[in-house]
């Protein structure tokens, strides 16, 4: 761990470090826990994935702006600025990142002790608290007005996705395209409805606000009493419609089956978890939403799941170049499971 000690030493005195060990289960960045002598706090060290995030310095500028804003809000509201928001460290040069000799980017933040994270919303109460966590983040960022770098081009932009889609249909694997005629027609049948929704965003009728863009439950930290502490993993924080955050959360919080369930009979909307999540979400974010956002709230999950269907199917039609697969039809299985989830949601909500 000599190299890691040297890297961490750009943020804190290297003599304070006891050991650095792998931490968490993230699939994009490499994350480590930096354990220090008893009189010092512990830290989280991350190597950012520059293949996914091509401009790490700009991404870190986003995170600095957002965490500074959140910290001010938390202090105003009487919260704990060391436990209710990520605390970034800077290098001896004052930068929120360190670039090593290989051109890899590293960041460090304060480790928040005595916390719990969850992979799935196993209870309605946990779904409700997850909604509170995302709703609170959005509420606290509602008056943020600074510019943010577009970390990932076209993220949740269906017009951008349709350009990729049309190109995939022209140049993809012809055998697989023929095999997936039903799935392709399914996407095309919903195309106008999805574009009409995105037009409302482009026209400003549904405003763009600061969004997290990866609202799975494991990105919310809880204390040991089960209360929400803070939202973490801010790499994808950007401007978008909050309905995208809401929709992505429902996609993971309230699916009765798995994202890649082979048996699609298992897949469907858990309406109790949906209602619990929306109750928690609106308790924090309800007053900031305009009437159009409230009207289209239930469409957020449909939009995000539709986009995910497209992404899984496009990858399958391009011979699986993006998502990791465990077997040859894995992306097609994912596609069909997400189609079933969307159809289930459509049976509950019509926009």
Image: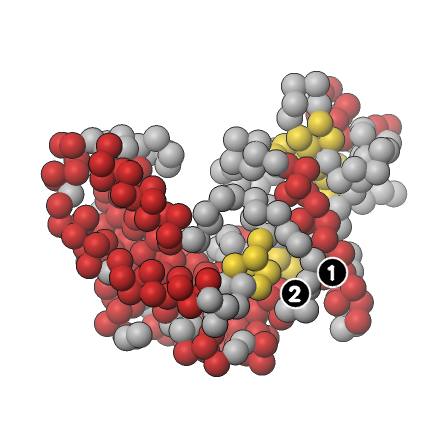
Q: Of the numbered discs in the image, which one, if any, rests on residue 111?
A: none
Residue 218 placed where, x, y %?
Answer: 53, 53
For numbered disc 1, what is the local secondary structure? helix
Task: Check the image and tell me how it is coloured.
Answer: secondary structure
Q: Is residue 303 above or below residue 182?
A: below
Q: Is residue 349 above or below residue 48?
A: below
- Residue placed at 34% from the left, 44% from the top? 163
Give the left or right position of residue 115, taking residue 273 as reference. right
User: Mark 2 or mark 1, which has the lower sequence index?
Assistant: 1
- Residue placed at 65% from the left, 23% from the top? 103
In the picture of the structure, the residue carrying the numbered disc 1 is 69
Q: Of the numbered discs in the image, which one, if any, rests on residue 141?
A: 2
Residue 318 position by quadrant:
top left
Q: Is residue 308 above or below residue 344?
A: above
Identify which residue, 21 or 167, lies in the foreground: 167
Label 1 crowding class (10 Å Cα cut-off): few <14, some 14-19, many 20+?
some
Residue 299 position by quadrant:
bottom left
For numbered disc 2, what is the local secondary structure? loop
- Separation of residues labelled 2 and 1 (CA atoms): 7 Å
Residue 235 placed where, x, y %?
Answer: 59, 46
Identify which residue, 343 or 45, lies in the foreground: 343
């Amino acid at each position: 761990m000599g190299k890691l000690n040297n890297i961490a030493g750009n943020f804190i005195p290297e003599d304070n470090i006891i050991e650095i060990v792998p931490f968490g289960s993230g699939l994009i960045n490499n994350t480590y826990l930096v354990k220090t002598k008893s009189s010092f706090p512990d830290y989280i060290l991350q190597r950012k994935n520059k293949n996914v995030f091509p401009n790490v310095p700009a991404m870190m500028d986003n995170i600095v702006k957002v965490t500074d804003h959140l910290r001010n809000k938390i202090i105003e509201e009487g919260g704990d600025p060391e436990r209710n928001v990520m605390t970034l460290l800077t290098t001896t040069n004052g930068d929120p990142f360190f670039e090593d000799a290989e051109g890899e980017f590293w960041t460090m933040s304060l480790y928040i002790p005595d916390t719990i994270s969850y992979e799935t919303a196993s209870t309605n109460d946990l779904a409700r608290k997850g909604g509170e966590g995302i709703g609170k983040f959005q509420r606290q960022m509602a008056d943020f007005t600074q510019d943010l770098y577009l970390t990932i081009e076209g993220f949740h932009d269906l017009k951008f996705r349709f350009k990729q889609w049309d190109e995939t249909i022209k140049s993809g694997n012809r055998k697989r395209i023929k095999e997936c005629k039903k799935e392709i027609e399914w996407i095309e049948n919903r195309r106008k409805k999805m574009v009409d929704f995105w037009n409302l965003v482009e026209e400003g009728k549904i405003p763009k606000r600061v969004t997290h863009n990866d609202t799975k439950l494991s990105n919310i930290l809880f204390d040991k009493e089960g209360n929400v502490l803070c939202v973490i993993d801010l790499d994808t924080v950007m401007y978008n419609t909050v309905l995208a955050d809401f929709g992505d959360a429902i996609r993971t919080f309230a699916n009765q089956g798995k994202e890649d369930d082979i048996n699609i009979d298992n897949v469907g909307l858990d309406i109790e978890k949906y209602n619990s999540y929306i109750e928690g979400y609106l308790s924090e974010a309800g007053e900031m939403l305009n009437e159009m956002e409230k009207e289209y709230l239930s469409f957020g999950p449909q939009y995000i799941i539709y986009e995910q269907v497209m992404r899984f199917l496009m990858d399958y039609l391009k011979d699986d170049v993006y998502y990791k697969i465990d077997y040859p039809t894995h992306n097609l299985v994912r596609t069909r499971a997400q189609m079933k989830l969307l159809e289930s949601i459509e049976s509950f909500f019509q926009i």
